[in-house]
Amino acid sequence: MKHKAGFVNIIGNPNVGKSTLMNSLVGANLSIITSKAQTTRHRILGLVNGDDFQIVYSDTPGLLKPNYKLQESMMRYISSALKDADVFLVIVEIGQKSIDSEVIEHIKQTGIPVLLLINKIDLTDQEATVKAIEHWEKQFKGAEIIPISALHKFNLQSVIDRLLELLPESPAYYPKDELTDKSMRFFISEIIREKVLLNFKKEVPYSAEVVVEEFKEEEKIIKIKATIFVARESQRKIMIGHNGAAIKRLGTAARKDIQEFVDNHVFLDLTIKVDKDWRNDDKALKKYGYEQE
């Protein structure tokens, strides 16, 4: 039997369920999921392997108009994803009427197969789903339309079956025992950043960047030191909270999820520092691992 392998790149607006879809397809929590937009900042690969196939799923930041250099970097990950795709998964949600026209046109010009997934159909009825299918058939001609619920994993097997039909014959791109291209430190920093997004409001979570400074594995415990950088002193004070209550609450929530992720006891030491206006600083963005021009 011939081996198939390829890149399946997930494209969509913020908050349509891209990260939930990614995690459901891979069977592991690789991408941050919150109700806030712009939670995904990097391009994250999730690998699904079989005896005769390897699907490389790619979750990218949601489509948006950049307002500062960090967001410009985020959009460059989408450009990369548009270049190496073997199949596109374009995800929209019930009630959504449009998606970035430039991206749609670019995808169409590639001639690469497109599965357009209408997500969150569990929140509506059959009549609305049929209308949504008809709408997207007109909006995105040539795409195969599949209604799904990423959260409840409804109809995802149909998506997987079709992907396996569409993938080209190729050897595996990554070792078959790997789940992702990212390091343990990356996912720990993402777990902490997820808790920042969940625990703070307004601009604070979008100004936060997490760096894991130390990761020491001992027999019965893993000791982790991480720094949360924010753009202004006022944000640092908010994150610490009265008598340190806010950072303690954040650390407790993050430690619980990290312990589940690493399957071991964890000691987590969090520090908050100011890196003034880092989101618009090329050197800072490079230091934090964001793609540069």
Image: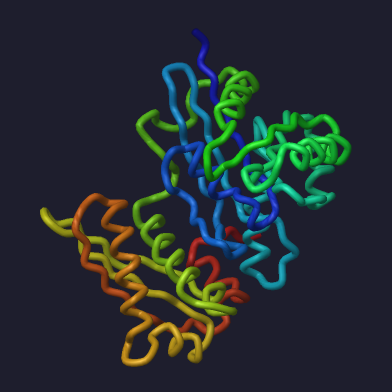
The quarter of the picture where residue 75 lies is: bottom right
x, y percentage for residue 53? 49, 21
- Residue 130, compared with residue 44, is above or below; it is above
Image height check: is 126 above or below 93?
above
Quadrant, the C terminus: bottom right
Query: How far across and down, in percent of the image, does residue 223 sit?
Result: 21, 64
Q: Residue shown at 45%/77% (left/top)?
A: 229
Tell me the residue at 52%/61% (across/down): 34
Image quarter for residue 65? bottom right
User: In the figure, 248 relative to 70: above or below?
Assistant: below
Q: Is residue 112 visible?
A: no
Q: Position of residue 246 (x, y in %)?
A: 38, 82
Tell whether 240 sits left or right of 165. left
Question: What is the basis of the colouring in this image?
Answer: rainbow
Residue shown at 65% from the left, 35% from the top: 85
Please indicate whether residue 233 sits to the left or right of residue 11 in the image.
Answer: left
- Residue 113, compared with residue 96, is above or below; it is above
Spot occupied by residue 31 in the image (x, y as percentages of width and height): 49, 52
Direction right: furthest residue:
138
